[in-house]
Image (cartoon, coloured by chain):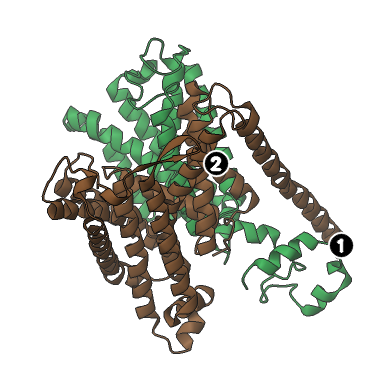
Chain colours: A green, B brown
Amino acid sequence: MSVRRLLTPGNLLVAIVVAVLFLMPSFSPTFLIYNVMTEALILGLIAATVVFLTSYVGMISLAQLLLAGIAGFMFGNAALEDSARGLNLGWSPWVAVTFALGVTALVAFLLGALGSRTTGIYFLMLTLVYGVIGYSVFAQVVTISGPGGLARIVAPAPFNDKLTLYYAALWLSALAYLAFRAIGRTNFGLALQEFATIPFGWDRWASTSPCSGRWPSRWPGSSPALQASSTCGGAHRSTRRRSRSAPP
Amino acid sequence: VADTSVEDARRGLTRQAVVRRIPRLVVPLVVGLAVVWVLFLARDTPAEPAISDPGRFAVTVLDGVTFAGLLFVVASGFTLIFGLMRTVNMAHGSLFLLAGYTAIELQQQMVGKTRNIAPEDVSIWSWIFPLLAAAALAAGLGVVLQQVLLRWNQGQELRQALITIAISVVLADQMIRQFGGLAKTMVWPGAVSHFIEIFGQRYATSRLFMLAVAVVVGVALWLWLTRTRMGMVIRAGVDDEPMVRALGINVTVVFAVTFFVGAFLAGVGGAMGASFAGAAIGSDGAWLLNSLVVVIIGGLGSLKGAVAGSLLYGLVVAFSPAYLPSEYTFYSVIFSFALLALVLALRPYGLFGRPA
């Protein structure tokens, strides 16, 4: 890709915003940096995952903040030593970070697998339910948190400095932006975007075949001759039974 | 080449079919284990095993069924609106809570006291009138929301869901401003606040009264949907809305009426819930969650599904704290999630649901 093609107004704007954000600590009050901008960048990073899922995969997930919360709680449980609540595992901070990310990825995979057959508005409702139930779990289960939550969690070594934390949040946000753009250009990303734009969701896509009786009539392979031919013989009884209960 | 690809596709389908069978084997296993646990094994729990304490078991079942009645009233409104209009009304919980607060205020006006209202002070009328008035208020607000904000986005489900989420946030703050942050309770009428003896246990008749009200609401709703012209139009609209429109029926009016009834049911549920568990900050979110769980289990847009979902969820909510070992009672919230997971693994669109 040539440099010239990268010089779009949008890219220029993003570059200017990032440059301003990098230079900001040198001219703006520290309160703004430490107490507003860091939090804004962290929340923005979480919001970016919602935007990624919505625009590339076509799923509006309301459970993203739950996953952020799980990572936070798992880090607190693993890293704290003598807190009033929680597991107090007292691990070294970076082991705790790895543990937190691992647990979060596992939970995200399980919740995603459970919801993978639902689409659209059903997915939105399901993820809202995930979020609220997750909230109740952390509010009620006193072994990992309880209603008061975990207090005095300290970030590991280089990030306990507030300015470093700001720059870390900024670097991560910029990296995430580039990564989402890059994923969108890979084969995987293109396939995801196709799924987001096909007329119905993953589930029906996966169970649709020319023989199931649900192959859209404007698609190739939908001729009655093929459906009546021997390739669509006695097999796939279960597919057919499902298709009868579905609306046209 | 074509033959091989068809063969490959068929093999893929068979593997898929095997993977899909797994939930059908797991679900009976989990249900069976739960039944055996409750009947024979549940020692050291708040309620002992059912064979050693059948009275407690019967009371837990009653708790579940009566709570399911309240769940049904609230969730049926939610599912009615979705079934016809494909609108997921995330402000349903807010309408519920607003009606609850309003009913409490009205009852206090009618009784003439703001605190320490005894059930004897409350006649049947000073319970039913606040309930109906508060439900009418919720219904009116619902229609305003639908006409002013949702009508222009008809058919854009996700946008409507996000709009109603925003409304619920605004309403939640306004209700804190208006009614304060303290939990309030509506008082059951004196005629139904007694205790009766069931299987050797004291049981509050107000819970049975709540179930009776829910049954009346359910039957009325069923009669309205199956025996009247408007109900017929709504059922036709659920099946094929463009066709109903093409037949010359004014669907816009039908939508408004449906939203009115759905929000009215949220209001009836709100007043009942305020008498049953009180109204407080956070009740709106909790009851939106309850409605969502019921309709996800039962299937969106299906009245049968709302009944089945309410019963299943109500029983799980009643049984899980009673039959968990005493020191693990706080894990009971996980069981609502487990119920949801089991149903979704078996039927992704709920027990009586269909893909949108």
Query: Who's the residue at 28% across and 62% down the image?
Result: B135
Determine whether, in the image, residue A12 is placed left or right of residue A193: left
* Residue A77 spot, x, y in % from top left: 44, 19
Q: Quadrant of residue B228?
A: bottom left
Q: Quadrant of residue B239?
A: bottom right
* Residue B347 spot, x, y in % from top left: 62, 54
Query: Would you place residue B63 above or below residue A97 in this image?
Result: below
- Asked if labels 1 and 2 touch by Cβ distance under 8 angstroms, the answer is no
Q: Which residue is mark 1?
A: B1
Three-letter code for the amino acid on which mark 2 is drawn: Leu
Specify the label residue A111 is tagged with.
Answer: 2
Q: What chain does badge 2 belong to? A: A
User: Circle 1 — which element?
Assistant: loop
Three-letter code for the amino acid on which mark 1 is drawn: Val
On the question of residue B18 being in view, the answer is yes
Q: What chain does badge 1 belong to? A: B
